[in-house]
Amino acid sequence: MIRPDQLFTAAALQALFPPERTHDFFDALFGDASEGAYDITLSFDGYDAGKQTLTFLLNLHERPGRCLACNLTSGLPEVFSRHPVINIKGLVREIEALLGNTMVCESWRIGRTIQKGRSLHCIPLHVEVRPQ
């Protein structure tokens, strides 16, 4: 059985969602990457064996001098689920590749934005898996 906490290390997560993706997202959105209010990182939030679900967080870190307001981030789950630069479908394929021959990603869904602090909001990505 795989140990997701050992598989999804900080280095693996940064490779799955590199910092350049935030740059490319805001460049596509505004035509200038420096216009973005936050940087996006990916973290692993856990594995629920009973539900066979991996949970990741797309973490929105407020940039200095910018405002990370709830009204700015509440609509992002829908945007992130279909935006070609964020590319959730591709991200899930890469997660499945990291799982090797042990598990297959059956489906995924994006949860509602969670405010973890004034300068940190998180968007959950739930990936349902099954043994291969």
Image: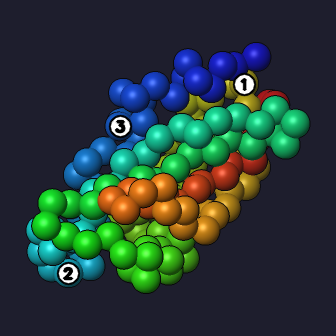
| In this rendering, position of residue 124 left or right of residue 74 | right
| Residue at mark 1 to residue at mark 2: CA–CA distance | 40 Å
| Residue at mark 2 to residue at mark 3: CA–CA distance | 24 Å
Dot 3, crowdedness within 10 Å: few (<14), some or many (≥20)? some
User: Which sits earlier in the primary sequence, circle 1 or circle 2?
Assistant: 2
Residue shown at the point (13%, 67%) measured from the top left: 65
Disc 3 designates what residue?
14
Residue shown at the point (81%, 32%) measured from the top left: 49
User: Which sits earlier in the primary sequence, circle 2 or circle 3?
Assistant: 3
Frontmost of labels 1 and 2 is 2
Percent x, y of residue 44: 54, 38
Percent x, y of residue 36: 22, 70
| Residue at mark 3 to residue at mark 1: CA–CA distance | 22 Å
Frontmost of labels 3 and 1 is 3
| In this rendering, position of residue 105 left or right of residue 29 | right
Secondary structure of the residue carrying numbered label 3: helix
**Any part of residue 79 in sight:** no
Dot 2, crowdedness within 10 Å: few (<14), some or many (≥20)? few
- Front residue of 130/32: it is 32
Secondary structure of the residue carrying numbered label 1: loop
| In this rendering, position of residue 78 left or right of residue 121 | right
Percent x, y of residue 34: 12, 68
Residue shown at the point (77%, 37%) measured from the top left: 48
User: Outermost residue toward the front?
Assistant: 118
- Per the rendering, the mark at residue 30 is 2
User: Which sits earlier in the primary sequence, circle 3 or circle 1?
Assistant: 3
Q: Are marks 3 and 1 in contact (CB under 8 Å)?
A: no
Percent x, y of residue 4: 62, 26
Q: Amino acid at mark 2?
A: Phe
Residue shown at the point (39%, 79%) measured from the top left: 72
- Per the rendering, the mark at residue 102 is 1
